[in-house]
Image (cartoon, rainbow, N blue to C red):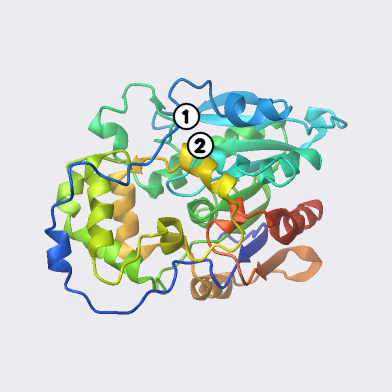
Amino acid sequence: MAKALISLVILSSLLCKFTVGTGRTTDLSAAINATAPAAAPFALSLGDDEDGGICDLLVTNQGYICEEHTVTTSDGYILSLQRIPVGISGGITPGKRTPVLLQHGVLMDGMTWLLLPPSQALAFVLADNGYDVWIANSRGTKYSRGHVSLTTDDKDYWNWSWDELVNYDLPATVDYVHNQTGEKLHYIGHSQGTLIALASLSKGLLMDKLRSATLLCPIAYLGQMNSFLARVGVDLFIAKVNFFSSSAIFNGNRIDVANLLHNICNVPGVDCGDLMTAITGQNCCLQSSTVDLFLKYEPQPTSTKNMIHFAQRTDTLSDKSDVRILLDVLKGRDDSNGKFMTQYVNNYAHADYVMADAAKEEVYDLVLTFLKLH
C-alpha cells in the first residue's frame, strides 16, 4: 500500500464468499464434453434497449434529480456516470455537498446501487443524507460501451481485464468527479469494485483525491474458494478457455455462455435450482421484488479476458479468510479516531450488501457514521 493510507472501512461477513458445496469428487470430462440443448435456459436479461438510461429508469421516476455524465479514459473508452446531486428533500446546495463515488462489481453496473426502494438503496440513502452521489459504470456494461474509435463489434474493444479498470477506468472517473466538484471524494466499492480500488491505492493513483474508501465484501486474495459449484465452474471454464478466447465478450445472452452454465449444472453434486444462492452464498435477506428487478437489468457483460483473469484463481469473490489476510497486510494503519474500521455481518452473503432489505440498518448506517468522520 502507499505510505499515506487513507481512511478505510471494510465490511465483510462469514458468508461473503461462494457457498460451501458438497465436496464430492466428480469426473469433469463428461460435463466438459457435454452438448447443451439448442434452447439455452439460462439467457440473462440486459433490460430494454430502448430506455433512456439509468437516470430515467431508476432515479427520476423516484422524484430525485439525476444527471447523465460521460468520461473518456486515456485508452479511449467512454464511460457513463450518473449523478444524484441532492436528496429528495433538497436542503444543502449541490456544490457544498461532499461527493461519493459508488463502484459496482463484476457482471454488474451502476444499477447495483438502485435496486432497493429509495429508503433502503445506498445511492438514495447517501443523497438524502447530504452527499453528492456519483455512480460509476465500468467499460463494457450497457451504458459504458462507447469508444473513440472502436465499436463493441470489434474484438479489440474487449481486449481488457480488471487491470485496465485499475489503470484507466477508475482514475479517469475519480479525476472527473474531483474536477467537477472541486472536492476530495469518498469511495464505496462492492466486490470487484473493492479489488480495483485496492490495486489503484497500492499504486498511489488515487491518494490525493480521496477522503476515504469503503469496501463492501472486499476482494484481495484467493485461497478460500470452497464452493463446489464455483470450483467446477472455474474448471469447466478453463477447460474451454481456448474456445471462449475466440469470443472477446463474455455475455450471458450468448449461447456459448448459457451452454457453459448448462454443463456446470449437469455435473453431479451441483444444484442450480437457485443459481444466485449457489454462486454468492446463502443471501439472507433478499426480497423477490428486488431479485426480479435484478434479473430484469443484470447481469451485465464483461470481457472474456476479464473472466479468464478471475478464473486463474488469483482473485475471486471474497471470503472471510481472505479478508483477514487483507487486514494483516495493511501495516502501519492508524486504528484511532476512526481511521480504520472493519465489521463482519454474520448472516450476509455477497448480494446482501447491495440488495438486502435490511442493508440500510445493518450496513449503510455504519457507512454513514464512517463517512461523517471524514
**Is residue 129 or residue 371 the one in the foreground?**
129
Q: Residue at x 21, y 75 (%)?
A: 26
Q: Quadrant of residue 5?
A: bottom right
Q: Residue at x 52, y 50 (%)?
A: 193
In the rendered view, does 331 fall on the left or right side of 279? right
Q: Residue at x 70, y 65 (%)?
A: 340
Q: Type of residue at label 2?
A: Asn
SS under mark 1: loop
**What residue did someone put label 1 on?**
143
Whether residues under marks 1 and 2 lie with C-beta atoms below 8 angstroms apart, the answer is yes
In the rendered view, does 11 fall on the left or right side of 75? right
Q: Quadrant of residue 58?
A: top right
| Residue 348 x/y as whole percent | 59, 65
**What residue did someone put label 2 on?**
137
Quarter of the image that includes the N terminus = bottom right
For mark 2, does the 10 Å Cα neighbourhood hold few (<14), some (14 to 19), or many (20 or more) residues?
many
In the rendered view, does 192 fall on the left or right side of 344? left
Q: Type of residue at label 1?
A: Tyr
| Residue 349 x/y as whole percent | 54, 64
Q: Earlier in the sequence, mark 1 or mark 2?
A: 2
Q: Which mark is residue 257?
A: none
Q: Quadrant of residue 15?
A: bottom right
- Residue 207 visible somewhere in the drawing: no
